[in-house]
């Protein structure tokens, strides 16, 4: 059984950079992901006056001297978050509470992703936004300052929306009460607690509610090792399950946040031979080792209640469904149309391009699995998870899949292709 370790979790890395920058004191961070998204967020924080050393990929400790909750400086130029939706949306929350005017933008992909889901509640709190190139899109000019309390019912279960509002309340000194239809990722709540900020999270009348009642004047620095990225791990679990390498695979120190590991329940339902060690706690996040063995899969149904806990794993889910017996149905996943690409459309088109029967639904997909060879050319649609998913599918014996724009995997996994080639040879 091969044993590997994943690069640091992208979501936790992004938040660690932000919280370390806002802390009072020196944070010590290990295992930061050096992918393009965290690099873009780090550059933006440097432009705001935070001294952040280079992010390297060997797990070296990075020390960041925080500037305090309201110690950021107005930048000399536009803040460009490139492809990082997490960085842009969370930092809109931070900037909403800063007494300055800043322009935020991104690359072509990020500039077509909706932003009013974040700016609407932040505007209700008192921040002022100017849409500079069309409604609901970047670039945005944000003018921040002291903020008002908010009781906000989010129409979508989105960790980015929830986190932006929580960060605005933290920096702007305002009470925050957020409700969402399902529980979304809770990395921000866990990191707030690690920094000494009390947060209340609970279910009430079928809704998930999060409260930040008494935002402090300062937060404690972090001493944190970033867990391995579960979403990155999922690609290699799929490789092992689908028989793309000899024997099995073990992945060490993977983040096992309950709001992220929904794919494991679905894999078990499909008959996959996957398992995890008992969980340890590391910086507020549960971690474990994951194992996977070659398995015969059967189709399943995934509905809206399972979507938030596996929102980034649907490209992996799609390629697993393509090799499962029967028709897999995915519904309630309309949020996939608003990711780095329209993932529903991209997955359906790419699956059909290599010979898989796939039907695009308004809020999901139906995929008929099979064991025939898959051959063709697909597009990454400038989406790192689309590229990596079809890379795994193409690595299986008998398949031949060419991927246009494969280098976009560097957004979240700089050495993905090298590791995939190495494992697929074993």
Image (tube, rainbow, N blue to C red):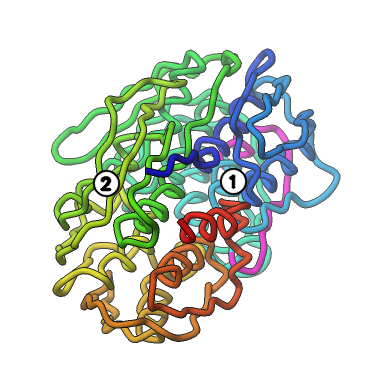
Instruction: Identify whether 145 is placed above or below 378.
Output: above
| x then y, percent, for residue 193 | 43, 19
Say if residue 207 shows up in the picture: yes
| x and y, in percent, of residue 239 in the image | 38, 58
The residue indicated by pointer 2 is 262
Asked if residue 179 lies in the magenta stretch, the reply is no
Q: Is residue 138 left or right of residue 155?
A: right
Q: Residue at x 15, y 64 (%)?
A: 298
Say left or right for 245 vs 89: left
Q: Position of residue 27 (x, y in %)?
A: 65, 18
Decide if residue 164 is in sight here. no
Mark carried by residue 87: 1
Q: Secondary structure at mark 2?
A: helix
Between disc 1 and disc 2, the foreground one is 2
- Indicate whether residue 95 is drawn in magenta: yes
| Disc 1 crowd, CA 10 A, few/some/many (<14, 14-19, 20+) | many
Residue range of the region highlighted in magenta in the rendering? 93-109
- Mark identifier at residue 358: none
Image check: 357 left or right of 144? left
Q: Quadrant of the N terminus?
A: top left
- Give the Cα separation between the discs numbered 1 and 2: 24 Å
Q: Give the crowd class for mark 2: few <14, some 14-19, many >=20 residues within 10 Å.
A: some
Which SS class for mark 1? Answer: helix
Labels 1 and 2: the sequence-earlier one: 1
């Amino acid at each position: 059984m091969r044993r590997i370790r994943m690069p640091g979790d992208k979501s936790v890395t992004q938040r660690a950079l932000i919280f370390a920058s806002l802390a009072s004191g020196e944070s010590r961070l290990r295992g930061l992901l050096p992918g393009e998204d965290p690099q873009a967020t780090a550059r933006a924080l440097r432009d705001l006056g935070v001294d952040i050393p280079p992010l390297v990929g060997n797990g070296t400790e990075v020390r960041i001297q925080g500037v305090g909750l309201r110690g950021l400086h107005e930048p000399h130029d536009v803040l460009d978050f490139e492809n990082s939706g997490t960085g842009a949306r969370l930092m809109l929350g931070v900037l909403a509470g800063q007494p300055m005017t800043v322009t935020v933008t991104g690359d072509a992909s990020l500039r077509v992703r909706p932003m009013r889901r974040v700016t609407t509640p932040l505007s209700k709190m008192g921040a002022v936004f100017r849409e500079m190139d069309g409604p609901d899109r970047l670039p945005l000019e944000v003018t921040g300052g002291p903020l008002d309390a908010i009781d906000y019912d989010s129409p979508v279960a989105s960790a980015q929306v929830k986190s932006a509002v929580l960060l605005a309340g933290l920096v702007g000194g305002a009470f925050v009460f957020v409700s969402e239809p399902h529980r979304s990722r809770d990395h921000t709540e866990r990191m707030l607690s690690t920094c000494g900020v009390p947060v209340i999270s609970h279910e009430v009348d079928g809704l998930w509610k999060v409260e930040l009642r008494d935002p402090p004047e300062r937060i404690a620095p972090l001493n944190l090792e970033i867990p391995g990225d579960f979403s990155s791990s999922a690609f290699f679990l799929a490789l092992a399950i689908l028989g793309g390498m000899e024997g099995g695979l073990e992945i060490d120190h993977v983040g096992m946040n309950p709001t992220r590991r929904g794919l494991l329940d679905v894999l078990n339902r499909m008959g996959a031979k996957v398992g995890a060690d008992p969980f340890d706690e590391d910086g507020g996040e549960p971690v474990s080792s994951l194992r996977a063995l070659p398995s015969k899969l059967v189709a399943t149904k995934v509905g809206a209640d399972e979507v938030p806990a596996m929102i980034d794993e649907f490209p992996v889910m799609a390629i697993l469904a393509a090799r499962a017996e029967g028709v897999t149905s995915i519904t309630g996943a309309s949020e996939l149309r608003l990711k780095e690409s329209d993932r529903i459309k991209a997955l359906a088109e790419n699956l059909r391009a290599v010979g898989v029967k796939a039907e695009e639904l308004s809020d999901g997909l139906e995929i008929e699995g099979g064991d025939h060879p898959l051959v063709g050319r697909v597009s990454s649609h400038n989406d790192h998870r689309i590229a990596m998913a079809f890379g795994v599918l193409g690595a299986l014996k008998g398949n031949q899949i060419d991927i246009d724009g494969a280098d976009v995997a560097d957004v979240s996994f700089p050495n993905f292709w090298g590791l995939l080639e190495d494992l697929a040879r074993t």
